[in-house]
């Protein structure tokens, strides 16, 4: 149940197998220590308890639409999908405010200094939600095209934007400025996810050369990249589904396909 790999810098780290579920579950929501997962057709829901490794099937609707981009502000859960900002309260999703004019479905959202930002790729703009007056404010980028953005994340009072040319940009929301602070040290084979944890930026990519899932960190104080772990996808015939962070643990879900009609969601855990 434990795989030990030799990490970068001669550090040995472990992936821990937690569970597998007999269907593909590409969408997940972390809620109070539970990883709630959903199939792509909305027909199947499972809940995984990170405290005791117990999986239960449930009929509880956990997401308003297909997405993994849930964000927390002041211990409250928010998600932006299909032009609407949703708020999660008492096991129900509530619509807060739509963006006018409509924002295309392809967009990114992040929290910077307890403010909610949406990056609208098609219209080359970012938008900040004002909680005080329930309104959106347009912010235009001047340095980069939003169509080149792969992902974004907020750390402290700044945003960090990762682009297709493997550059990392630092966004100051007060001055509305973007600064190119780093170039990722290798070609980005297949981008999977960017997230933050304890003032560090984490990048999850798939190396298509050796078919390994790679996890990198970026230290915002030193502006240095470091690969901390990799997972041999071909060894297990896996493909990436989603990842969530609970306390100090990174949970990564893979799709394990046996036949066209038989596949599993396999969940592994890595201590950060």
Image: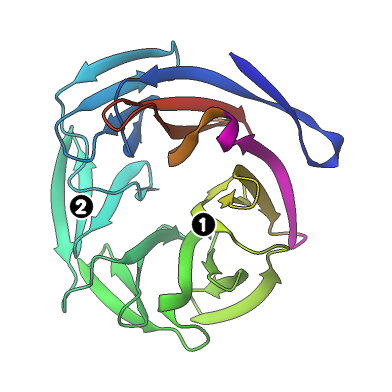
Spot occupied by residue 1 in the image (x, y as percentages of width and height): 58, 13
* Quadrant that contains the C terminus: top right
Residue furthest toward the front? 259
Residue furthest toward the bottom? 142
- Kind of element beneath mark 1: strand
Spot occupied by residue 189 in the image (x, y as percentages of width and height): 58, 59
> Which region of the structure is painted magenta?
222-235
- Kind of element beneath mark 2: strand
Q: Is residue 90 left or right of residue 114?
A: left
Which one is closest to the eye, mark 1 or mark 2? 1
Tell me the residue that label 2 is attached to.
Answer: 86
Q: Pick the residue in front: 72 or 23.
A: 23
Q: Residues within 10 Å of mark 2 (few under 14, many from 20)?
A: many
Principal SS element in the magenta part?
Answer: strand
Spot occupied by residue 27 in the image (x, y as percentages of width and height): 31, 40
Q: Pick the residue in front: 238 or 129.
A: 238
Say which residue appears at 49% left-offset and 58% top-offset: 153
**Mark 1 to mark 2: distance in Å?**
26 Å
* Marks 1 and 2 in Cβ contact (< 8 Å): no
Q: Is residue 234 magenta?
A: yes
Say which residue appears at 46% left-offset and 71% top-offset: 149
Q: Is residue 186 magenta?
A: no
Figure quadrant of residue 85: bottom left
Q: Which mark is residue 205?
A: none
Tell me the residue that label 1 is attached to.
Answer: 191
Kindly tell me whether residue 168 is visible in this rendering: yes
Q: Is residue 12 left or right of residue 242?
A: right
Q: Is residue 134 left or right of residue 3?
A: left
192 to 31, vertically: above or below? below
């Amino acid at each position: 149940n434990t795989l030990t790999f030799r990490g970068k810098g001669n550090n040995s780290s472990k992936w821990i197998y937690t569970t597998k579920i007999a269907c593909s579950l590409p969408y997940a929501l972390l809620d109070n220590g539970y990883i709630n997962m959903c199939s792509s057709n909305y027909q199947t829901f499972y809940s995984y308890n990170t405290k005791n490794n117990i999986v239960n099937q449930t009929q509880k609707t956990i997401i308003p639409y297909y997405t993994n981009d849930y964000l927390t502000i002041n211990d409250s859960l928010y998600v932006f999908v299909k032009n609407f900002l949703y708020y999660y309260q008492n096991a129900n999703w509530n619509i807060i405010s739509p963006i006018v004019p409509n924002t295309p479905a392809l967009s990114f959202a992040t929290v910077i200094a307890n403010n909610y930002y949406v990056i609208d790729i098609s219209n080359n703009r970012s938008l900040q939600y004002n909680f005080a007056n329930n309104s959106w404010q347009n912010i235009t980028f001047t340095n980069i095209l939003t169509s080149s953005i792969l992902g974004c994340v907020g750390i402290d009072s700044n945003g960090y934007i990762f682009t297709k040319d493997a550059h990392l940009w630092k966004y100051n929301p007060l001055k509305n400025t973007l600064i190119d602070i780093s170039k990722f040290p290798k070609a980005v084979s297949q981008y999977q996810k960017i997230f933050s944890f304890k003032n560090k930026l984490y990048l999850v990519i798939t190396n298509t050369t050796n078919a390994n899932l790679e996890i990198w960190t970026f230290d915002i104080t030193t502006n240095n990249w470091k690969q901390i772990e990799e997972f041999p996808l071909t060894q297990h015939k896996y493909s990436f589904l989603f990842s969530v962070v609970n306390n100090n643990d990174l949970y990564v879900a893979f799709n394990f396909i046996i036949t066209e009609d038989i596949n599993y969601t396999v969940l592994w855990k890595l201590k950060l």
